[in-house]
Image (tube, grey):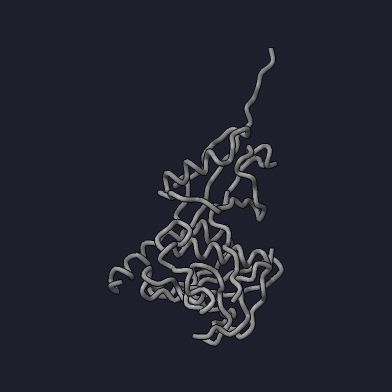
Amino acid sequence: MHDAASRALFEEEVSKLGLEVISLRGWTLFCKAFPILDVGFSAQDGARIRLKLVCDDWNERPPSVQFLDWDGRPLSVIERDPAGVFNNSAHPTTGSPFVCMKGAREYHTHPSHMGDAWETVRGTDKFTLGSILTQLWHVWRSIHK
Amino acid sequence: MIEHHKKTLEIRVVTTSGVFPESGFEHVPEHELVKAILEKADKKLRITNTTGWIAVVAGRKIDINRSFRDNGLGGRVEIDWGPDHGAGGDA
């Protein structure tokens, strides 16, 4: 996708992440400047994590999702969730833990899921940037209430 | 003469596509099904497919096919409306 079109779509979707949803979910918005959407999740038990969505070529490609600590350092180990979305094994491309779920670039480029094409869900309500973030939020909530 | 007072709630639906209503709250009777206001929100926010979405209130998933009263809700309620996470792969 053309860079300007990608940026425009990114900014349109990110502009809808209003104070209400950020406040209700207790999110911390670290960065929303194209192509980065960097959001922190906090739990009542004190656990925190940042998810950095690298959205270059949005939405021709899904975002690459990186796990960061609260200071922005990449995590080499992450907590597993019951559904197995947060995957601790090294991704063949990045060598890092990754999100093993539709909507994450690392899922669709993983050799185990090459047949599960991004194009089949791209542009649907469940796979906007906000919706992908919401899905990851629910994964996080399954670990930390 | 017996006077019936219909209990109402103040409802706001919060999504990553926007908030319904845009400002303030919707006043709805407690016997109304949760999905009724979600459908209004979907229409206003131009959300067309909510298959696999869940409604959460104060950290608790609620049943959208039941009424607010049957979900034990009252007063002012913010509904967090969005897609549940997909299944993890076997990678």
| Viewer-side residue, B75 vs A90 | A90
Q: Quadrant of residue B87?
A: bottom right
Disc count in the image? 0
Residue farthest along the right direction in this orientation: A45
Q: Is residue A139 visible?
A: yes
Give the x, y percent position of residue B57.
63, 51
Is B1 on the left or on the right of B10, as rendered? right
Q: What x and y, as percent, mark residue A37?
A: 45, 72
A32 left or right of A68 in image: left
Along the line of sight, which residue is nearer the eye, B28 or A84?
Answer: A84
| Rendered position, A131 above or below A73 | above
Q: Is residue A30 visible?
A: no
The quadrant in which the C terminus of chain A is found is: bottom right
Q: Quadrant of residue B44?
A: top left
Position in image of residue A119 (x %, y %):
40, 66
Foreground pick, A74 / A102: A102
Q: Residue at x 30, y 71 (%)?
A: A1
Q: Please report the residue visible at 56 percent of the width from the left and 80 percent of the height from the top.
A: A68
- In x, y percent, where is residue B49? 46, 50
Which residue, as the protein is rendered here, is positioned at the far top? B1
Judge whether A71 appears above or below A41 on screen.
Answer: below
